[in-house]
Every structure is written in C-alpha cells, then in structure tokens.
Image (cartoon, helix red, strand yellow):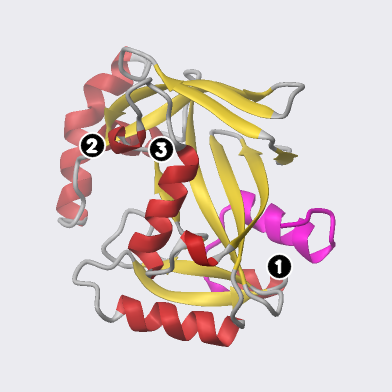
Amino acid sequence: MTIRIVPLSGIDIRLAPGPWPLPPELRAAVPQRWAEMVADNPHLWDGRVLGVMHPRVDEDGVLRGRAHEDAFSTFMTWRGAGFPDCGITNLFGSALIVSNDGAIILGVMGADTANAGRVYPPGGSLEPRDVGPDEQVDVLGSIAVELTEETGLDIAEARVGALLAIFDGPRVSVAQGLHFPQSAEVLLARIRENLDTQEHRELADVVAVRTLAELEAAGEVLPYIGALLSAYEERRVSL
C-alpha cells in the first residue's frame, strides 16, 4: 500500500448526521468484542469519536470530507476486524514537535491505553468537542488541545510550520509541524516533568528521533509515521 504525504493549505471537514456505515454483521458484533477488550484492559473507556468519509485533498490544497460520530467501541471493533472498507477513515491530528536542533519529539503510549507501546506524535481521535456551532470540525484545535493534555507544551510557544496529510490506507494523519525554541534535551526534560504530575497519563515516555532507524528502535511504529520520518530524514519533506 502506497503512503502519500500531501501538503495542505487548509482543512474543511464538517459533521454530517448518522453513525459510521459499518456492515450490519460487524455492527452487531460490537458489544461482544468490546466486552472482550475491556476484560483485557479495564482502563478502556467507551467515549464518542469522529470518523471521516472519503477525505480528499482538492486542487486548492484543502483537505475536505464529511465526519460522522460513533462510539469508541465501534472504532475498536472496526480496527480489530482489520479496517474493512466501508468508506470511513480514522482521520486524526498529530503534533509534530520539532526541537531547535532538528529532532522530532514523539510519545511512547502507556500500557493502559489502546495503543500500548506504539510510538506516535502527540495527538488523538477527533471528538464531538472538536465540532463548532457551524458543524466545522476543528482539527487544528484538536491538535493544540492534545499537545497540551499529553505533554504540557503550549502551541503558542511554537513557530507553526508545514501542515501535511499522510494517507495510509484507513488512517489519515493531519500533521502540523511545530518548531519549539528549545533543544531536544530540554523538551524531553520538560515533558517528562509534566508527565510525572499527571494522574492519568497517556504517555509512558517521550523520545527524540532524527532518523527512521532511531524511530524503529524506540518501539512499535505504524507505517504512516515511518514514512514521514523517512521523508524527513531524506529531506523530501519540510516540517
């Protein structure tokens, strides 16, 4: 499967009525599969999330699509079934923290999360709180909120860089480059200090990486972030 990294000039995603168009047999399996997941990990919580139907980048560079709300248990059942194609994508925001010495700061997900051990940029699923009164989904606002919740960093401290969409099959990462005026060493220390104060932390740790090899040594890596680090290392994309 080819992963595409596309520069964006803007985002226009709006909430539409109705749940995700899961196949009926998969929808019927949600309660049982969710019960099994919770039995394995009692820390899981069945909140509400947004998925985006058929996202696309038009000629003007704007990412467009229709969002639909459903339960996190629905998302996890769909994911557990291997993301069967029903038109929906897991579109989410990612904060690409770039230090002043060229490292990208990534989080290592904690054991109590649904993505334990995976290495990600800070970010998360879109939620109903990200929808404005005009039904516009504020992806960039979601990135800012998730950045602070997970790391304690404030987006106002950063110089905003490139905005990218990374298309990886059923996943679409909307990645915002954020250039902080501190070194990787200082940023890691700041984030770790903040993590130690969090009662319900999502991140077990943070790592600074500059190359794909460093990323792969840090933990489990999904293809989209591997493709981004490879392109960054080879200077095919600028953050």
Measure how far apart labels 2 and 3 are at the Cα level.
11 Å
Q: Which residue position is annotated with label 1? A: 212
User: What crowding class fits label 1: few (fewer than 14 Cα within 10 Å), some (14-19), or many (20 or more)?
Assistant: many
- The residues colored magenta run 218-239
Task: Provide residue 164's location: percent of width, then percent of height.
Answer: 66, 44
Q: Quadrant of residue 199?
A: bottom left
The three-letter amino acid code for the residue at tag 1 is Leu
Q: Residue at x 44, y 35 (%)?
A: 138
Q: Secondary structure at mark 2?
A: helix
Q: Where is 175 relative to 148, above or below?
A: above
Q: Report the mark closest to the observer, 2 or 3.
A: 3
The three-letter amino acid code for the residue at tag 3 is Arg
Measure how far apart labels 3 and 1 are at the Cα level.
25 Å
Task: Provide residue 221's location: percent of width, then percent of height.
Answer: 56, 60
Magenta span contains residue 227: yes
Mark 2 or mark 3: whose residue is earlier in sequence: 2
Measure how far apart labels 2 and 1 are at the Cα level.
35 Å
User: What crowding class fits label 2: few (fewer than 14 Cα within 10 Å), some (14-19), or many (20 or more)?
Assistant: some
Q: Which residue position is annotated with label 2? A: 33
Q: Quadrant of the N terminus?
A: top right
Q: Where is 221 relative to 24, above or below?
A: below
